[in-house]
Amino acid sequence: MSELSPELILAQKEAKYYRKLFEQRASQLVNAEFEVSKLRRDVKRTNLSLSLIAELNKHINVEDSFESAVKIGLNGIRSSLELDAAFYIELINGKVQKILNSGYKDEEVKKLENTKFPDIKFRIQESGIIVREASHEIEELSTLSKIISLPYFVLVPLFSDNNLVGLLIAGRKIEKEPYAPRLDEEDRIILFTLGSWITSMLKDRLIGLMNEYLKLIDKNIIISSTDLNGVITYVSDAFCKVSGYSKEEIIGHTHSIMKHPDMPKSSFRDLWDTIVQDKVWTGEIKNKDKNGRGYWMEASIFPTFDEKRKKIGYTAIRQNITDKKIIEQISITDGLTGIYNRRYFNELFPKVINGAKREDKLVGFIILDIDYFKPYNDIYGHQMGDDVLIKVAKTISGTINRADDYCFRLGGEEFGVIFHVDTQEKAIEFANKFRKNIENLQISHNGNSASDYVTASVGLIFKKANKINSIHELYKQVDDLLYKAKNSGRNRVCSNI
C-alpha cells in the first residue's frame, strides 16, 4: 500500500475531529462514521478543505470581518460542491439574529428571518440529513424542507457551551433531477470544516466582547472579592482609583485597612451576620482612602460559589455616593456648630432605640442646656453667644469616643447626646464628663450664679432599650430631669439612676 499524502493524513485527522465533535454535541449518531478507508484519495478535494480554512483565516486577518469571511466560505462551498444554496443562520435563544447566504433571493431570506428555530437536539440519519429529534421525523423534515426551500440538504448545528448558536445549511434542488443528488462524505467534511470554523470564530468573537466588557467593568465599576475569611482576592481598577491603593497594596489584606473610624462596629456585625447566611447585604459604608480622606460607598455584598455550588467567598459591588452624602450631610448638620441638627435627631433616634432593642442593649440619652445663656447674650452680645455655642458643641463632640455615639444641637442652647456604655456608673461618669469639660473651657460668664464660667445642666436617662415604650415618653423624661438639674442649682447632672 502506497503512503498517504500529507494532505490526506491531515484530512483524516479532521474527519476524526468532526466525529468526536458530533459525538459530544449530538444526542444520537446514526451511521455518522467517517472511516479512513472510505475516504477517496482525491488530493484536489482534500486541498479544498484545507484551502477553505486558509482563505477564511487570511480574510478574517486582513479584513477583520467575520461576516464577509463567512460569505466567502458559503460562496466557496456552493461553487466547489455544485450546490444550489448555502447559508448560515446565527441564533440567540432560538431566534434568528442574522442570515448570511449564497444562492438565496432576498424574499427567501426575509422569510427565514421571520422563522423561529428552537433549541433542539439533532441526529444524523443514514441519508446524511441532520434533523430534529422527534417522533414524526418525516413530517418535521418536510416542514424544515419547506422553510428553507431545499428538498435535499445537509444541516450542521453549531454549538457553544451546549447552546445552539447557529445553523449551517447547504443543499441541492431537484428541479430537473429524477433523484436526490446527495452530498457524499468528503462534501460533508468540507461543510463540517466551515461549521467548525464559524463556531470557533463565534467563540473568539464572544471572548473578545467579554474581554472588552470586563475591561469596562474593571475600569468603571467598583468591585472587590474576598475569600471566606474576608481576605481580598480581587479589586477592580475603579476600586483602586477611589481608594488610592494599588492592587498590590490591597490584595491579601482585609477591608479593615480602609475602615473609617466613624463606622460603628455594629454595622459590620450586621453585615457579616447577613452574608454568612448566604443573603445579600445592602447598605452604606464610610471608608478612608490611602491619604486618610473619607468617602462614602453604597454597597451590595453577596456570597460567591464555585461550579459545584460550594461557597468560596464574597463579592461587593459599590457605588461612590460621597457627593450625595455631602449634600445629605449639609441637610442634617447645624449650620452654626457643625454637629447634627434636630432634623437628624428626629430621624436617627428611633433607629438607634430599635437597634438597641434588637440587640437587648442599654442606651443612654442626655439633654444638656447651657446655664443662663440669655443673660450671657445680653451681657456679651449675640456674636459672643454664637462663639460659646460653637465651643460647647466642639467640646461635646470631642467628648464622644465611640463611632455609634451621636451629638446634636436640638435648638437654641440645648444639645442632645445618644451614647452606649455598659454600667450605670459609667453612664453617670460620662454625663459628668460633659459638664466638667464645658466648665473647664473657662469662658467667663458674670451672669452665671452657679460659677464664674459658662456651665451646663444635664438630664440623663440610662436604661434597657426594651423598657423604652415610646420616643416621646423618653424625651419627656430626660427633659424633666434637665429642669430638675436647673431647679437644683444648675451645673449638675440629674438622672433616673
Image: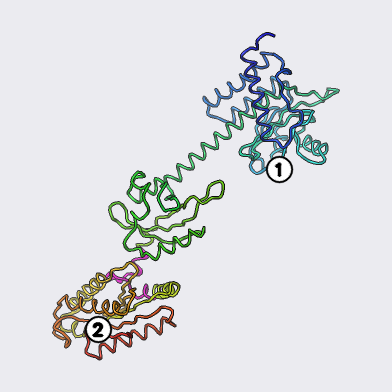
Magenta residues span 327-347
Q: Residues within 10 Å of mark 1 (few under 14, many from 20)?
A: some
Give the amino acid type for the residue marked by disc 1 in the picture: Pro
On screen, residue 188 versus residue 266, left or right, reads right
The residue positioned 18% from the left and 83% from the top of the image is 376
Q: Residues within 10 Å of mark 2 (few under 14, many from 20)?
A: many
Q: Nearer the viewer, residue 232 or 216?
A: 232
Instruction: Give the total number of marks visible in the rendering.
Output: 2
On screen, residue 321 versus residue 396, left or right, reads right
Work out how far the residue at label 1 is from the one at label 2, CA to CA, in angstroms: 79 Å
Residue 361 in the image: state x and y as whole percent: 40, 74
Give the amino acid type for the residue marked by disc 2 in the picture: Ser
Which residue is under mark 2?
Answer: 457
Q: Nearer the viewer, residue 81 or 114?
A: 81
Mark 1 or 2: the one toward you? 2
Circle 1: element type: loop
Which residue is under mark 1?
Answer: 118
Of the residues under marks 1 and 2, which one precedes in the sequence? 1
Whether 330 is among the magenta residues is yes
